[in-house]
Image (spheres, rainbow, N blue to C red):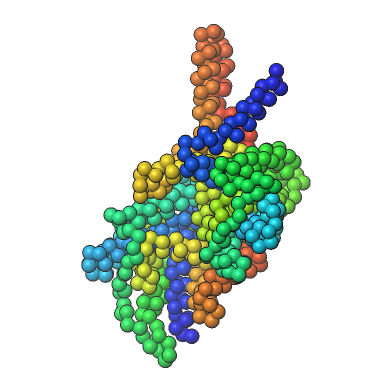
Amino acid sequence: MLQLVISGLAMGSIYALVALGFLLIYVAVGAINFAQGDMVMLGAFFGVTFATMLGWPLWLAYFLSMLLMLVFGYVFERVAYYPLRDKPFLTVIISTIAVGIILRNLAIQDWAWGPEEFFFGTLVSDVPIEVGDAVILPQHLFIIGITVALLVAQYLFFEKTFLGRKLQATAQDQEAARLMGIKVERMMIITFVMSSFLAAIAGLILAPVLFVSTNMGFHVGVKAFVASIVGGFGSMAGAITGGLFLGLLEVFGAAYISSAYKDAFAVLIMLVVLFVRPQGFFGEKIQEKV
Amino acid sequence: MKIGVTLMGTLVGLVLFIAAPFLMPSDYALHLTNLAGIYMILVLGLNIVMGYAGQVNLGHAAFWGVGAYASSLLVMGWGVPFLVGMFCGAIAAAIVAWVVGYPTLKLKGHYLAMASLAFGQVVYFVLLNWEPVTNGSQGLRDIPPPRLGPLVFASDEMFFYLAWGMLIILTGITVLIRDSKFGRAFLAVREGNIAAEAMGVNVANMKVLAFVISAVYGGIAGSLYAHWSTYISPDNFSLEASIQLLVMLVVGGLGTLGGPLLGAFILTFLPEWLRFLKSYYMVVYGVLLIIFILRMPYGLVGLFERAGAWLRGRLGRAFAAPAAPRQAAASGSTTNPPVSVGARDKSP
């Protein structure tokens, strides 16, 4: 039981992190970033390159791949969002789709990482801990710990720092923020960089649990979508609860019903949510203004 | 005279249509042309709900899948004729759209986008997990080819007539819908919910209607696809397929008639044209997509309109200039882009 809860929460944390990445960009730009899952893959692959292929220490691999992903976030904003900033939101969606396609297909090239699956070591011990009859992987605890720490840090950043408040203001109303002297352009870059950073961390802490391959991003991305929809797209509480909920649901569904039907279980929930509360647990009903 | 021209045009068109499969440079080109025909039907349908009624749909492939499975299962299991199968496939897709449409279309803008994405996933997972009926990830094999009385559309040549014939009929129906009072109501809904409501348009019903019509197109395309390829699996109708359809529509031009046709056709062939790039062809495809969307946010149709206006402006000047300077000035007005029929895409 404890074992299931822990591994469910760990998977859920990953979904929540990826969902938060979606959320950051969605709130700021109003478009869905379809490349978020592929950014998770990229972060994990950077880690694999430094740690598994070059044999450098893990902490250095973590550090370097986060750094590279910060750079990637910047480039991503400049290339795929900035030129489209006043175009309809569908065009931004298409450009993120294109970025996802490019990333997946570059990663699978022979000079890059190819179609194989890669192993990635864990920062913590890989000896399972036994608590009573439960067997717990330290990496799962690590994932949960990192996620909680990130969430707290993010909350403090948005609520307590000046920069965080400027970001919030920009997300609420770009025009008004600009009139208040906020450099909207810079805020957008920060948003994309943050979201890319979240993707890097999600990729790095997920990598030891799952093997790293070019497809991992898309799968995690889809799951995170589902999680954010169930939780309520556009709200932080929604992304977190949706992620954790989906993670627990999958693990318990696989354990008590059948592993073949674990997705079906998630679908059932999604159907119910779609019919009863299509805006998700935490989504607000928006009244349209004339 | 006028009638004569129209008659000649129709005749030439008919001859071209009949000759087309035999004019193809290769069997593979014909195969892709057929595939393009199916995509064009799908995107034509998607355009009704997204382009005309302005409701984002990120799960259109679900209707494709419902139509494909419903039609195949009926024909294989109960031995009904192909036409009945196709009809039932379209009806099944329409019913699904109606059931799902009511709760989700109450949502606005981005919530709707999310809900439609979720709905697409739901259908995908149902196809994947309802094994007794759909055979799960194995998919359905040996689906019989389309049959109409004595005609069997098994070969690519024969199927071309069926798919493109259907496409032509559906394009005509699209024009009729666009110009009907429903089409105008869809546009009103797109341009502003509250204003439309104030003018007496039942916004909720119109959205659901557009959604259902688009599903019918999807169902028909699904049935055609299933009986043509003889093998379907849930992966054909996943989120990736929905995204592909969306890309085709936006690249072609949202809210126009030519846009969906052009976008679907070109993007079916584009990967093949890029084949010579070997393993890089998808990378280049992605890069082209970005460049494209940066340069032409209003799609290929928008580009052609601008090119046409520019050309007419140039021609107008060339003819008018030597004759009378005053006329040249007047012809300058043609350089303004023409007002497009379906209006440009407003972000929904």
Relative height, residue A237 to residue B26 (above, below): below
Examine the image and state in which quarter residue B52 appears: top right
Q: Nearer the viewer, residue A118 or A224?
A: A118
Pick the residue in front: B188 or A182: B188
Q: Is residue B278 visible?
A: yes
- Relative side of B174 to B261, left or right: right
**In which quadrant of the rendered view does residue B151 lie?**
top right
| Residue at the spot 47% in from the left edge and 60% down from the top edge | A22
Residue A120: x and y in percent read: 31, 69
Q: Nearer the viewer, residue B252 or A76?
A: B252
What residue is at 61 percent from the left and 46 percent from the top? B153
Outermost residue on the bottom side: it is A132
**View extreme (right): residue:** B200
Residue A144 image offset from top left, x and y in percent: 41, 75
Judge left or right: residue A77 versus residue A226.
Answer: left
Relative to B49, residue A198 above or below: below
User: Which residue occupies 58% across, 16% down?
Assistant: B330
Q: Position of residue B134 (x, y in %)?
A: 59, 65
Total number of numbered discs in the rendering: 0
B199 on left or right of B117 = right
Q: Nearer the viewer, residue B303 or B162?
A: B162
Where residue B167 sits: x, y (%)?
62, 42
Farthest front residue in view: B150
Q: Is residue B42 visible?
A: no
